[in-house]
Amino acid sequence: MNIKLAVLPGDGIGPEVTSQALKVTEAVCQKYGHELHYEYGICGAHAIDAVGDPYPAQTHQLCMESDAVLFGAVGDPKFDNNPSAKVRPEQGLLAMRKQLGLFANIRPVETFDCLIHKSPLKDDLVRGADFICIRELTGGMYFGPKKEGDDEAYDTNLYSRAEVERILHVAYGYARQRRRHLTVVDKANVLASSRLWRKVAQEIAPQYPDVTTDYMYVDNAAMRMIQEPRFFDVMVTENTFGDILTDEGSCITGSMGLLPSASIGTHTSVFEPIHGSWPQAAGKDIANPLATILSAAMMFEYAFSLKAEAADIRRAVQRSLDENIRTADIQVAGQRPYSTTEVGQWITSQISQKSE
Ligand code: IPM
Ligand code: MN
């Protein structure tokens, strides 16, 4: 297969983790006989510095012409504490989502047995938790009409029926491939937008009689995720609720450095770790590259339907954990922390050496 990749490393630790995932991607392509071409694009804070735009037109062009986008992270503290900044790195991410039509964000929450101790939750509660959150990504408050005045400000949680329908169909598709249990998360006891979600979900549910659908208010869902994470299989929710719940979900696993994500929609799909740009660690070669490497695995599976390749990456990641080739955030006591580059290199050579 011919694969054309857009690589958007972004800011902070983005470039370091992305280069490890790219090494892994190259090794997989080499091993399975795929021809890989990739090109770098700028985005985020350094794109603001370079051209004044966090998602410049040439980066969008590159994404549109590629088969998939491998994305690092964006963000820079110099913008965080400046509420009057005209442009922010995060706007680049939002522009990319909107312009590529990335309406579905898939965030799996899986636990690794050997890392259970890292979770702030009790072992027996977390062990075996395995669900995915499908977050609507191009609607709701993030993109609805806004006003930002000195005395009054608002964001509008606008959803159309069509937007709700298409994300629900995606969610049911995932539920069918898994344990056939879909939880629709909303706040229908208060919000009109949520009542539309629930109404549309109730209309669509009969089309999927093989899937059990249940409905949960978001406050209750936040509690249930901590109390009984194994309850969930596939969860679907709107943009803002999904943003909040997936950060919560990352704690179940034990480290932000482990969770990959895929954003899919009408144009090229984007694969990125869910952690941010961690500016304090930038350039130190200490960040955990696993979330980005696992995002590359999602890319092989979802963008190219190459399941064996994805499984190969996941096995190599598992082996690195088993052999304690781990960065500081997840290393066990008494073992030395490995650098970002060492972990990436170890996983890359595992993939190159073993013929499965
Ligand atoms: C995420 C991030 C983004 C979001 C920010 C950086 C705009 O938190 O991908 O979850 O809120 O969607
Ligand atoms: Mn977030």
Image: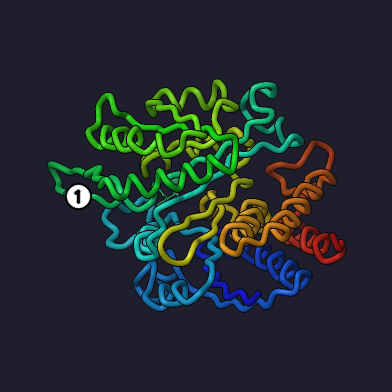
Q: In this picture, is 1 found above or below 278?
A: below
- Measured from the top left, where is residue 299 in percent x and y? 60, 60
Q: Give the residue displayed 40% in from the left and 34% down from the top.
A: 206
In the rendered view of the protein, which quadrant contains the N terminus?
Answer: bottom right
Q: Nearer the viewer, residue 306 or 42?
A: 306
Query: Residue shown at 62%/28% (left/top)?
Result: 120
Instruction: Identify the coloring.
Output: rainbow
| Residue at the (59%, 33%) spot, across then down | 252
Q: Which residue position is annotated with label 1? A: 146
Quadrant hosting ligand 2: top left
Whole-percent x and y of residue 275? 54, 49
Residue 351 against residue 199 in the figure, above or below: below
- Residue 101 relative to residue 231: left or right: left
**92 with respect to 326 (left or right):** left
Tell which residue pokes out farthest to the left in this image: 151
* Residue 198 image offset from top left, x and y in percent: 32, 33
Q: Which image quadrant: the C terminus?
A: bottom right
Q: Nearer the viewer, residue 161 or 254?
A: 161
Q: Quadrant for residue 115, please give it.
A: top right
The one of 273 and 157 positioned closer to us in this rendering: 157
Q: Secondary structure at mark 1?
A: strand
Relative placement, left or right, of 250 versus 43 is: right
